[in-house]
Image (tube, rainbow, N blue to C red):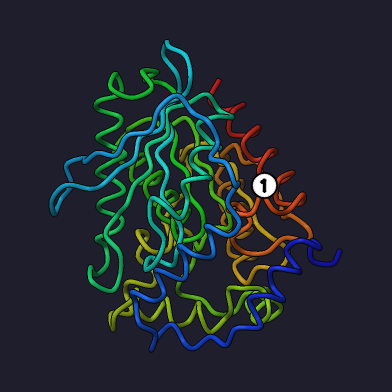
Amino acid sequence: MPVDPSIAALLKEAHAVPRGRIASADIAELRQGERTSNAMVAPRTPIDVGSVADGMVPGPAGPVPVRVYRPVGGGPVATVVFFHGGGWIVGDLDTHDHVTRRLCHDLGAVVVAVHYRRLPENTFPAAFEDCLAVARWAAGHIDEYGGRRDRLAVAGDSAGAALAASVALAFRDAGQSLAAQLLAYPATDRASGTYPSHAENGEGYLLTLQDLRDLTAILVGGDPSVATDVRASPLHAASHKGVAPAVIATAAYDPLRDEGLAYARALMDAGVDVFVRNYDGLVHGFLNMFAVSQGAESAVTELIGELEARLR
């Protein structure tokens, strides 16, 4: 199946602008570029929710910024802690605001979006530590959020999905309960460069193989052991048995496709409840594209439906 027509138009636009290596780019410019590109594909009118409030949660290196979305209505509801993507370098609460609004609105759940410490200013495992701290804070203060103690989930896209998967493993190891994890095109393995999708989709689909190599190098920071650390590469966990039920999405034209599918297989082999779908015609980042692509809209609707089924 060819690339979704609306996304193909976005790709043509993106390719018209020369882009240098992430390794040598100005970080502030990269971050502004991410904000601009995501604003272009967001709905023109923000999705309505009950309320939105920025706040802080205690973290290992100081307060962690969060944005809490509450649904319309009262009563106990599920809680989803969301970690934005962006290669551990870009992305923030604003770049994914339309995604977290959509989750809150469609699920009728409280969504706690996390702005974790990013590379390169903060080295590994700062991002993971912040994400775990907020997820544990939400679990320990659930009455301040959704209120349903048995319906806490984690979610994320790309690097954020990797963080969500690693947090789910940490919850499992600590004997803490999670109802589900939503992983959109997760980056699960920073140690291997041998996946077929790395080569098949390494050019022309927004995220490139060179991007992956640069981002991995920045994440590893000269310490090869980071590449197989479960906090960076959840696929390398000694066991995946007993981890939270998972909803996993990959995109046919994404260099990360096969890493996500490998993670789904690892979970299924461990007896975990897994819904996995590789979406034809879509590219990396489609979670943010539901307002401009019917293919992305259909995929996001299905993924939220699968997550909802695990949060009832």
Residue 169 or 68: which is nearer the viewer? Answer: 68
Q: Report which quarter residue 185 is drawn in.
A: bottom right
Q: Amino acid at mark 1?
A: Val
Residue found farthest to the top: 75
Q: Residue at x 62, y 26 (%)?
A: 309
Number of other residues with Cα within 10 Å of mark 1, as a class: few under 14, some 14 to 19, many 20 or more: many
Disc 1: which residue: 276
Residue 44 horizontal side relative to residue 139, left or right: right
Q: Is residue 94 above or below residue 27?
A: above
Q: Position of residue 292 (x, y in %)?
A: 69, 53
Residue 34 or 123: which is nearer the viewer? Answer: 34
Residue 192 horizontal side relative to residue 11, left or right: left
What secondary structure is marked by label 1? strand
Q: Is residue 186 above or below residue 120?
A: above
Q: Residue at x 62, y 64 (%)?
A: 284
Q: Residue at x 44, y 62 (%)?
A: 236
Observer able to see residue 96: yes
Residue 164 horizontal side relative to residue 5, left or right: left
Q: Position of residue 118 (x, y in %)?
A: 30, 64
Q: Position of residue 176 (x, y in %)?
A: 33, 32
Q: Residue at x 24, y 34 (%)?
A: 137
Quadrant (top left/top right/bottom left/bottom right) for the N terminus: bottom right
Label tally: 1
